[in-house]
Amino acid sequence: MDHAVYHVLEQSREYEVDLVVTAGQWPDGLTGFAFVVGPAQPTVLDFAPSGPGMLTRVDLAKRVWRTRRVVTPDLAMLGGLRAALAPEELQRLLTGARPSLSHTAPHFFGDRLLLTADRQRPVELDPVTMTYRTFLGAVHEYPQVGAHPLFPGVQTTSHPVVDPDEGCLWWSNIHLRPRGRSTTDAEGPLSVVRWDGHGELETWEVPGARITQGTHEIAVTRDYVIFTEIGFQPEPGSVAGRGRTKPHLPFTDIYLVAKRALTRARVGSAVPVTHARVPYESFHEFADYGQDGDDVTMYVAHSNGWDMNYAITRSDIVWRTGDRLRSCLSGFMPTPVDAAPVGRHVIDGRTGQVRQSRYFLDPQRHWGTLLYARDTRPAALERGRYLWQAYWGATPDTMVSAIVEMYADHPFRVVDVDDLPTTEIPSSLVCIDLESMIEQSAWTFPAGTICESPVFVPDKAGGDGWVVVFVKHADRTELQVFDALALDLGPCAVATAPGLRMPVLFHSGYTETIRSPGTDYRRSFAADLGTGWRDLSPAARAIVTEIVEAFG
């Protein structure tokens, strides 16, 4: 059987198409804009997550789909250098570089559209024209920066969080370095970052946090900013997902910084932190903004057994059969090798004591906690009621033997290695009741398809709203619409367009309206570069000069 996963690395394309409803009836009240982003394919490094951003905007009322390549100063300069330099010079120049790929997640801060990735500063785009405006924060505003004449490394997070009370954004800044001369271990300091949307970044050091893998999503409550370490092992000796030797840590470290310590008087200084730890690694999490005293309630989409920092190679073999993996998967990530729960953890923000943990999991169905959607209106932020979790599923013929062996001794395994699936576990979408941590409704997609990037869309008329998901088939990409609290009824509408096929997709977001930002906030790209590039070769200098003049 042909499967959507065999086509995820095909050529990325720009689109400007009208969606045609092929099943059901499009809801009259479905309005606003869904955004989704992912890395362009194919990639120079032959590793799916290393491509520059491809941004899609869907006008849900008019059913117009628009996909554009993200063009930032970094990406424009990278493209120019690749075209102008000999491979040897390009390779030398890119050693230690961290270009901003802007391919992981769209976020909204009022009217402003941000694109993010863990290894770069957030980028602001105009949501109407989908064009670059500025990086958020000049390079010198970040305390942790990896030096490079063209692509300084500013490692942050893919998911900053809006603070509804303070009207600001919180994110992080870290700088992982090899531990001594180790080729397997890395460690780096953590800094809290706060931005009000207009002025300079404010940062505080957190010396009590020990980051060894990275931060991906930030959470916020009334009293705390929360940093969670992602299950993503960055071995200094591996390149583009290859040469991995060690698994992710089998737990999630959580660091809670009290807002009472994050004052303007203490900007630039060290602040205390509370540490908590829960079983299973994680990709994504959020917290109820409201608290019960000092008790913080967090929801964690755990990711045990899913190694997304491993690139399938042509020498990899399939678990059990010993067959070679299909050549079309070279550079993609392997399928999960264990079922994964969603956890509800109540943590004492002062002591780090985990007071209660409850898990949602059906080991027969819940593999690959890909992405989730949630209601971001004020009442739902205060106390979350529902979570719409998308599951990747598991395909046995993409189960890499090396990964099975790497995670065979995971201390919190759900499914024993001897019981790993021999038939496909399909992709699915589940509405989880966050109060009871039980299934409210669910839908399983047909074998051979992948459900990705769910988006919750509220109903202005006061109904339950909808969940919009991007569904990949082997020959097409569809937009499917579900009644938010009746997933078990199946999609109420399905739409696509002739020739519409999207490769890798990552995160999505929703906004009710779009308009070009009125702010004059800008950070100088020329100032960020400094003068070190003037010592490069004439060919390289010519490219940089052109980009500085265009984006300076």
Image (spheres, grey):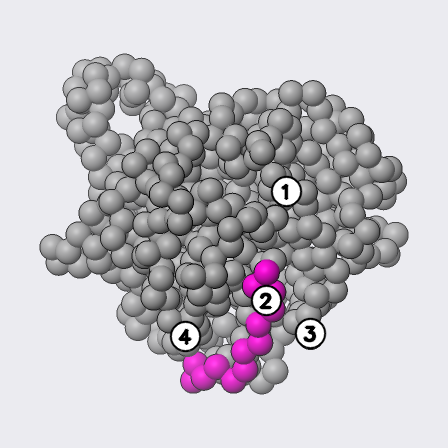
Among numbered discs 2 and 1, the one appearing first in the sequence: 2
Q: List the residue tagged with mark 2.
A: 361
Please name the amino acid that badge 1 sits on. Answer: Ala
Image quarter (top left, top right, bottom left or bottom right) of the N terminus: top right
Residue wearing tag 4: 277
Task: Say whether disc 4 or disc 2 marks the residue closer to the N-terminus.
Answer: 4
Tell me the element at label 1. Answer: loop
The image quadrant that residue 277 belongs to is bottom left
Residue 265 visible at all = no
How many other residues sit within 10 Å of disc 2, few (<14), some (14-19) or many (≥20)? some
Front of the two marks 3 and 1: 1
Identify which residue is drawn at 56% across, 26% down: 68
Residue type (three-letter) at the residue carrying disc 4: Arg
Query: Which residue is rendered at x = 32% and y = 57% of the image?
Result: 406
Give residue 229's position: percent from left, percent from top: 39, 62
Q: Which-is-in-front pick, marks 2 and 3?
A: 2
Task: Sort mark 1 into few (<14), some (14-19) or many (20+) by Cα contacts within 10 Å.
Answer: some
The circle on residue 447 is 1
Q: Nearer the viewer, mark 2 or mark 1?
A: 1
Question: Is label 4 or label 2 in front?
Answer: 2
Q: Residue at x 27, y 57 (%)?
A: 246
**Disc 2 to disc 3, how far (Cα)?**
15 Å
Spatial separation of the CA atoms under disc 3 and disc 1: 31 Å
Q: Residues within 10 Å of mark 4 (few under 14, many from 20)?
A: some
Q: Is residue 498 left or right of residue 403?
A: right
